[in-house]
């Protein structure tokens, strides 16, 4: 119970961080690079995501996920390993662009430049990383595992339920690209699109984030995404 209380306190601090970034952008507005991002910064959305994350914490502790500062998890596991994975993923993201390959623009981007410029890129992508990991990992993965294992299977099949949840939730970020490719393909071509998507770095990174969440708790996928954003959005995108 003590560790859960610590998780609640840390989670409350993370939500307060979202509120601080929201207030910063009220004072210093920034142009959102992707259509619909404005809604993610609304007070109502922050309230909703805060409640979703709290529910996720409750479901996570009922389905075998570590507490946020679980005593069984070392700081090396919680911070260093995810950081290294995120940095490697970030370098893999920008390396083709540095070699002259063209970048595929996000289907919902409002311009060819999808990056917020420095220094506002730091709070913007910190907010984005935290928001997405609360929604995707803490809430969605925990919810699916709880529904499948605890409710439907009455406490059985937790590992299988986790991997099913990890794969399903991992489709969220590639979905706009997937739908765009579907619109320009035949039925046979759509099969190739699906195979290319699940073999792609965006899908695989989301599965890896879910695995880190399962093994090391919520801070691990958050650190992984922050590290990736540091290379991709803040250094490469924000300073160029």
Image (cartoon, rainbow, N blue to C red):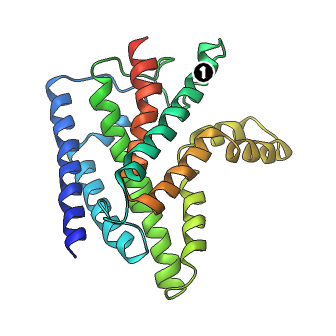
In the rendered image, the quadrant that contains the N terminus is bottom left
Q: What residue is at 42 percent from the left and 52 percent from the top? A: 77
> In front here: 45 or 217?
217
* Residue 221 seen in the current view: yes
Q: On screen, 94 above or below 159? A: above
| Pointer 1 local density, CA inside 10 Å: few below 14, some 14–19, many at least 20 | few
Residue, far bottom: 154
Question: Quick check: 84 left or right of 218?
Answer: right
* Residue 38 seen in the current view: no
SS for tag 1? helix
Residue, far right: 188
In the rendered image, the quadrant that contains the C terminus is top left
Q: How many marks?
A: 1
> Residue 177 in the image: x percent, y percent?
62, 37
Q: What residue is at 50 percent from the left and 56 percent from the top? A: 210
Q: What residue is at 40 percent from the left and 28 percent from the top? A: 230
Residue that numbered label 1 is attached to: 95
Q: On screen, 168 above or below 40? A: below
> Residue 213 in the image: x percent, y percent?
44, 58
> Residue 39 in the image: x percent, y percent?
32, 41
Question: Quick check: 188 left or right of 19?
Answer: right
């Amino acid at each position: 119970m003590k560790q859960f209380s610590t998780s609640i306190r840390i989670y409350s601090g993370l939500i307060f961080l979202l509120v601080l970034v929201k207030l910063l952008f009220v004072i210093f507005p920034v142009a959102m690079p992707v259509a619909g991002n404005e809604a993610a910064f609304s007070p109502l959305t922050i309230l909703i995501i805060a409640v979703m994350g709290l529910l996720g914490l409750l479901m996570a502790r009922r389905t075998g996920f570590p507490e946020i500062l679980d005593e069984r998890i070392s700081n090396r596991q919680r911070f260093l390993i995810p950081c290294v994975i995120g940095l490697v993923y970030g370098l893999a993201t920008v390396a083709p662009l540095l070699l002259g390959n063209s970048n595929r623009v996000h289907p919902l981007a409002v311009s060819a430049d999808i990056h917020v410029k420095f220094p506002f890129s730091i709070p913007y992508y910190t907010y984005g990383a935290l928001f997405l990991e609360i929604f995707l990992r803490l809430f969605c993965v925990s919810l699916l595992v709880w529904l499948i294992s605890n409710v439907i299977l009455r406490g059985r099949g937790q590992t299988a339920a986790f991997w099913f949840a990890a794969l399903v939730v991992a489709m969220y970020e590639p979905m706009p690209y997937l739908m765009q490719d579907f619109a320009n393909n035949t039925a046979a071509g759509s099969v190739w699109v699906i195979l290319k998507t699940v073999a792609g770095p965006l899908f695989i990174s989301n599965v890896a984030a879910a695995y880190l969440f399962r093994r090391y708790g919520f801070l691990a996928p958050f650190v992984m995404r922050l590290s990736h954003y540091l290379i991709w959005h803040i250094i490469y995108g924000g300073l160029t």
